[in-house]
């Protein structure tokens, strides 16, 4: 359609999703193997809930057949679109433009990525290089145990190696603390629930 309309050269086409497969309204993630062998579905912070396909194309701009393994997130799209459109004044966001990666250039990514989810007892996750830390039930214990996975060797997050790498766990815990921003409308940690109930 872009080709037919003469818009192929000045349109950046992106195909992705904001979460993994779901069970809502009768969805059956297992029927089509929607997580592709990864652990978890929508509302999980394991890879099956947050790792998504990402395809991008713009004639003459993106590198055909190029595959990048640099972790990126949806919040990187806004700065990417601004750079692609030639916008000079960019607002301050957590995202980085991944336009160089889309062009097939080497690019340094985020030092870490952080997610949180408020349902199901509260969850936090950090991706740092090949390492992924997941903390569950943070509504009850803000400093609970962190599960640790090496996504390079274990993308399905089946082997929790936290006890073997305490220094990595400590660093991920520090990133979780640094990235978390309290919000009275979205309490996550036990102390915030205590304040809400007073």
Image (spheres, rainbow, N blue to C red):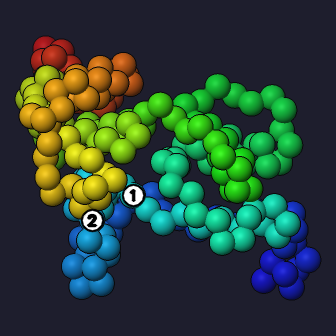
Residue 100 locus on image (x, y percent): 72, 47
Residue 193 locus on image (x, y percent): 16, 23
Q: Considering depth in this image, is 40 or 196 the residue closer to the camera?
A: 40
Residue closest to the far right:
6
The quarter of the displayed image where residue 127 is located:
top left
Residue beneath label 1, please?
51
Instruction: Name the secondary structure under disc 1.
Output: loop
Is 27 on the left-hand or right-hand side of 52? left
Is 195 on the left-hand or right-hand side of 35? left
Residue beneath label 2, please?
38
Q: Considering depth in this image, is 189 or 12 the residue closer to the camera?
A: 12
Quarter of the picture holding the N terminus? bottom right
Tags 2 and 1 touching, CB below 8 Å: yes
On screen, residue 41 above or below 196: below
**Could you tell me which residue is drawn at 64 percent across and 65 percent down?**
66
Is 108 on the left-hand or right-hand side of 186? right
The quarter of the displayed image where residue 78 is located:
top right
**Total numbered labels placed on residues in the image:** 2
Residue 73 locus on image (x, y percent): 50, 47
Neighbor class of circle 1 (other Cα within 10 Å; few <14, some 14-19, many 20+) is many
């Amino acid at each position: 359609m872009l080709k037919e309309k003469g818009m192929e050269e000045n349109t950046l086409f992106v195909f992705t999703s904001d979460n993994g497969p779901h069970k809502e309204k009768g969805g059956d993630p297992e029927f089509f193997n929607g997580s592709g062998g990864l652990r978890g579905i929508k509302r999980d912070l394991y890879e099956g809930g947050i790792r998504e396909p990402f395809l991008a194309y713009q004639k003459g701009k993106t590198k055909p057949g190029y595959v990048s393994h640099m972790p990126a997130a949806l919040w990187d799209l806004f700065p990417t679109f601004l750079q692609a459109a030639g916008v000079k004044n960019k607002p301050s966001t957590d995202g980085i433009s991944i336009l160089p990666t889309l062009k097939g250039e080497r690019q340094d990514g985020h030092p870490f990525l952080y997610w949180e989810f408020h349902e199901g007892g509260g969850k936090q996750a950090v991706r740092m290089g090949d390492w992924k830390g997941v903390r569950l039930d943070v509504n009850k214990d803000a400093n609970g145990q962190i599960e640790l996975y090496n996504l390079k060797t274990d993308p399905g997050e089946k082997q929790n190696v936290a006890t073997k790498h305490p220094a990595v766990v400590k660093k991920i815990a520090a990133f979780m603390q640094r990235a978390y921003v309290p919000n009275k409308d979205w309490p996550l940690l036990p102390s915030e629930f205590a304040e809400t109930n007073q």
